[in-house]
Image: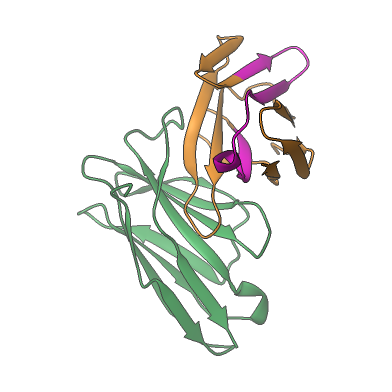
Chain colours: A green, B orange
Amino acid sequence: DSGVTQTPKHLITATGQRVTLRCSPRSGDLSVYWYQQSLDQGLQFLIQYYNGEERAKGNILERFSAQQFPDLHSELNLSSLELGDSALYFCASSVEGAGFSEQFFGPGTRLTVL
Amino acid sequence: GENVEQHPSTLSVQEGDSAVIKCTYSDSASNYFPWYKQELGKRPQLIIDIRSNVGEKKDQRIAVTLNKTAKHFSLHITETQPEDSAVYFCAATLPFFKTIFGAGTRLFVKA
């Protein structure tokens, strides 16, 4: 157990819908990262937050947004869902925000869009 | 932007043999290079990392080498065991910027 929690574990929804994925980082970690992993694919970096502020952005679609709250938990919002958004979404956390330390991954949320 | 290429995509070795996975990065400003192992259905976990001021790092059966000039870094696993079977990801990080992962190498260790 990495100490990073993600909810829900599984999510099944329909095209056009909106969902929210939640992540709680390890105690003491200030950085949260979001990744998308499609079937048999690598980890695509979406976005990073550090202590409530957006720190880095990857190839995140405009339909996706995220935020980190004062208690450091983070939410990833996916809207106008398409079939291609079906994937495993990982959240990771690290103690600092410069990218030099180990990222601890949560168990992931598996999103299925029908 | 930063790009990380990883080879091979699939690697099959006999138990006890060595396995080598190679990665190339594009941005010379990258200075942190972690390797993650992801077992089937599980989360990625860090197995070893190296910073740009170090050329080699070893941890038991696992070693990583970095050639900054060529922008190459490699993972070496010696005396492979069946439990080493997994997908391995290399990554490169630009300071205060994003971590870019390679596409992954699926390692099969045959008993």
Quadrant that contains the C terminus of chain B? top right
Q: Could you say where residue A94 lies in the image, as x and y percent from the top left?
A: 36, 39
Using residue A2 as the reference point, say whether residue B64 is left or right of it.
right
Task: Tell which of B35 and A54 is nearer to you.
Answer: B35
Q: Residue at x 67, y 34 (%)?
A: B15
Q: Residue at x 45, y 79 (%)?
A: A11
Using residue A84 as the reference point, say whether residue A91 is left or right of it.
left
- Which quadrant holds residue B31? top right
Task: Tell which of A109 and B3 is nearer to you.
Answer: A109
Can residue A100 be seen at all in this image of the molecule?
A: yes
Using residue A90 as the reference point, say whether residue B79 is left or right of it.
right
Task: Tell which of A85 and B79 is nearer to you.
Answer: B79
Q: Could you say where residue A76 lies in the image, as x and y percent from the top left?
A: 42, 65
**Magenta stretch encompasses residue B74:** yes
Say if B37 sits above or below B71 in the image.
Answer: below
**Magenta stretch encompasses residue B2:** no
Determine the residue located farthest toward the front in the rendered image: B111
Quadrant that contains the N terminus of chain B? top right
Using residue B82 as the reference point, say whether residue A6 is left or right of it.
left
Q: Could you say where residue B52 lies in the image, as x and y percent from the top left?
A: 58, 15
Say if B72 sits above or below B111 in the image.
Answer: above
Say if B63 sits above or below A57 in the image.
Answer: above
Q: What segment is highlighted magenta in the picture?
A: B64-91
Q: How many labels were placed on the picture?
A: 0
Say if A24 sits above or below B28 in the image.
Answer: below
Q: Could you say where residue A57 lies in the image, as x and y percent from the top left?
A: 54, 49
Can residue B5 be seen at all in this image of the molecule?
A: no
